[in-house]
Amino acid sequence: MAIAQTKTGWQVEFRVNGRGSRKYKRVFPTKAECDRFQRFTIAQHETQSDAKPWLERPKDTRKLSELIELWDDSHGHFLRDGKRRKSKLLMIAEQLGDPVGSNLTRLEYTRWRAQRSKEGKSPKTLNNDLGYVSSMFNTLIKAEEIHYPNTLTTVDNVKVPENELSYLMHDQITELLEETKEGDNPHVYLITKISLSTGARWSEAEGLTVQRVRNNQVSFTDTKSGKNRSVPITPELFEEIHEHAKLTRGNSIFTASISSFRRALKRTTIELPKGQAAHVLRHSFASHFIMNGGNILSLQKILGHSDIKMTMRYAHLSPDFLEEAVRLNPLSSGI
């Protein structure tokens, strides 16, 4: 290896790996440039030598069910719904014919999804399926368990029609509370009040313990979003909950009461869209919160929504929004 001055500049001459290897000979304006070229070229040769690009990675022939087991061992069993999700993934693999994972194509998946849709599966179910499979592939790629791209990243979700969010008016709330109070289950009335007062899901209110009701607030743990949250309540409701807790044994305040609630709801004159029962209590809290001037960001925290888009479903009930609709419509100028 040598760098020498010539009539036209500086010449560098070297071999990348000793005798027998490729020889480089170049002329540059400066000696420093010669040195940089020499070091760069040798480094490039060493990197390519380590990579051995002529040795192709053998094709991954593991079936989708094998990848699911691999995903479960390294990641899935840590999830709260890991067992359910694994069961769902194995069902999908079976219905797809358990193909080799690296062979699963966008077309193959979308055709299977179209068939599921014809069988009556809802858009939400179809989108959940896509999310589970795509997430599994992404997790395995990140862990370097597989070395091929996730072909499902280009598959779009099915458009989900926005469901009607019913909420109870004041007279309906009064009717429902009276019916739950007169029922045969001593827990239904108070669980209903807690849900209406805090926006809690029925399971969250039903699962309260004595330790989670303190300082005029209730704390919800093991929630759908995985995040704990606390919501203030009135001193009267706080006392009512603790008085009720004296009637039960152990740490739990309530027992399973959803069936009793549904029976009480049926005895009222309230009519709800299909699929809505106890969840109408959560919708009622959110709707009245916004109609009474509540802040949308505060509502997001109270409800525990991880995505503000979920909370924005109630934004149209804001009094400011409604007032502007009246004040700013094209007929408001007296045409």
Image (cartoon, rainbow, N blue to C red):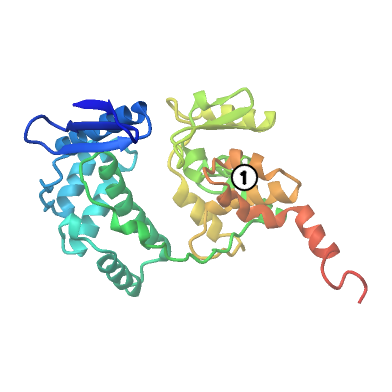
Front-most of residues 224 and 141: 141
Vertical order, 144 against 104 (above or below): above
Q: Residues within 10 Å of mark 1 (few under 14, many from 20)?
A: many
Percent x, y of residue 7: 32, 33
The quarter of the displayed image where residue 252 is located: top left
Residue 103 placement, left or right of 260: left
The quarter of the displayed image where residue 126 is located: bottom left
Q: Could one spot residue 179 in this view of the protein?
A: no
Could you tell me the amino acid type at mark 1?
Leu
Report the residue at 22% width, 37% height from top.
Answer: 25
Percent x, y of residue 331: 86, 73
Report the residue at 36% width, 67% height from top.
Answer: 121
Q: Could one spot residue 114 in this view of the protein?
A: yes
The residue that mark 1 highlights is 196
- Residue furthest to the left in view is 20
Report the residue at 31% width, 47% height from top.
Answer: 138
Front-most of residues 81 and 55: 55
- Residue furthest to the right in view is 334
Vertical order, 71 against 41 (above or below): below
Percent x, y of residue 334: 93, 73
Q: Which structural element holds mark 1?
A: helix
